[in-house]
Amino acid sequence: MTTPRGLVVALFFLCASAGAWGEVLFAPADWALQAAFPVEPKTDDQRTPSPQGDQVAERRFLDSGTDRLMLIRFVYPMVPPITERGSLYKQSVEAMMNSRPGVMHTDEILTLGEHKGMRLVIEQTREKTFREVQLVQIGASLYVASAEWAGGAAPSPVARRFLESLAVQPGFASARVVEDRERFRAIVFGNFTLRYDASRWFRDPEATEPNVAVLLRIDEMAEAEFMGSRERNPAATMEETVLATAREHAESVKVVRRGKKLRGSTTVEELRFAVRSEGVTYENHGYFYSGSEGTVQLRAWSPDRTFKRVEGDISELLDGLSITRGVAAAR
């Protein structure tokens, strides 16, 4: 994945002042890292558009004139795969060094509990300062902590205290638990919830129709559509509605398999069908339901030449559907 442009801006734009050292612990429940600041830090959240949606840089910072402290959380529209963590760190460091050149004195592995990151010490020759930067990916987010000081290579007391205070919060201590928990995201339409793997799929930011979500894969080999409403479907079966819609714009539609699936205690219709459009055949697989809870359609498709390669991921996506019982739909 590419490093967000907001990273460069967030890392180097500092504009607040701090007073004498007291100690304010910054440790919100949804942040994996905590840090102690001299006083309440300033806030500057920035959004950078990307093809997968907005990349958000949430920055907490202070500038006393001689000491600059900063903690940033980068939240991405897709979860950065943990296997690509090294690439994410490398791109982030390159962005920092290109935007604000300096002399690298330390470049080493950082360990924060079970989480592996990078620790850098950079001499900013133009400003005559030194800066320590720590980067660590925890779950779906990249955290960047930076302390900069004047007066030589040894950290100032303020910088040292800030760096020593950095710690992983208890709810994020287990790397395996956090990676599994934050890898999945959910979309809720009324009584219908879709839990999906955000390291493979992302929600199309250009699809803005109410109660409709379009999911795309980063490798462009498959797409999916999730639709939910509180209205009952007037047709006798969901198959009638689904195939009638497909035939409106297709050269041909062929049913491959019909079936039933249990989603919790609810039985949904399962349908495999092939749609030929503009000379390309697309294999479709979906779950469909209409009842007292409302109506839901969840289907994913891929060109027939690539369907086998993503069939397992499509099945996993479909199995992320859940239905809340006991809430009546409009008639």
Image: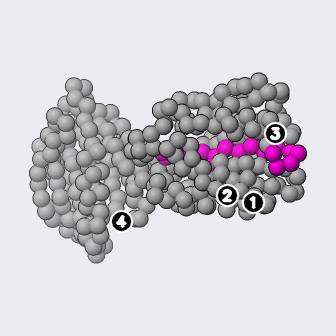
Viewer-nearest of discs 4 and 3 = 3
- Disc 1 residue crowd, few under 14, some 14–19, many 20+, Cα 10 Å: some
- The colour scheme of the drawn protein is one colour
Locate residue 258 relative to residue 70 in the image: left or right. Answer: left
Task: Write down the residue under mark 2.
Answer: 107
Q: Which residues are magenta?
A: 135-154
Q: Quadrant of residue 327?
A: top left
Residue located 40% across and 41% down the image: 177
Mark number, residue 104 = 1
- Disc 2 residue crowd, few under 14, some 14–19, many 20+, Cα 10 Å: few
Circle nearer the N terminus (3, 1): 1
Residue 263, compared with residue 28, is above or below; it is below
- Element at badge 1? strand
State if disc 2 and disc 1 touch (CB < 8 Å): yes
Inspect the image, locate mark 4, and give the three-letter code of the amino acid beneath it. Met
Mark number, residue 156 = 3
Q: Nearer the viewer, residue 228 or 29?
A: 29
Q: In 3D space, how far apart are the residues under numbered discs 3 and 1 (Cα atoms)?
A: 19 Å
Check the image and name the residue furthest to the front: 154
Q: Nearer the viewer, residue 199 or 173?
A: 173
Percent of width and height locating residue 182: 43, 43
Inspect the image, locate mark 1, and give the three-letter code of the amino acid beneath it. Met
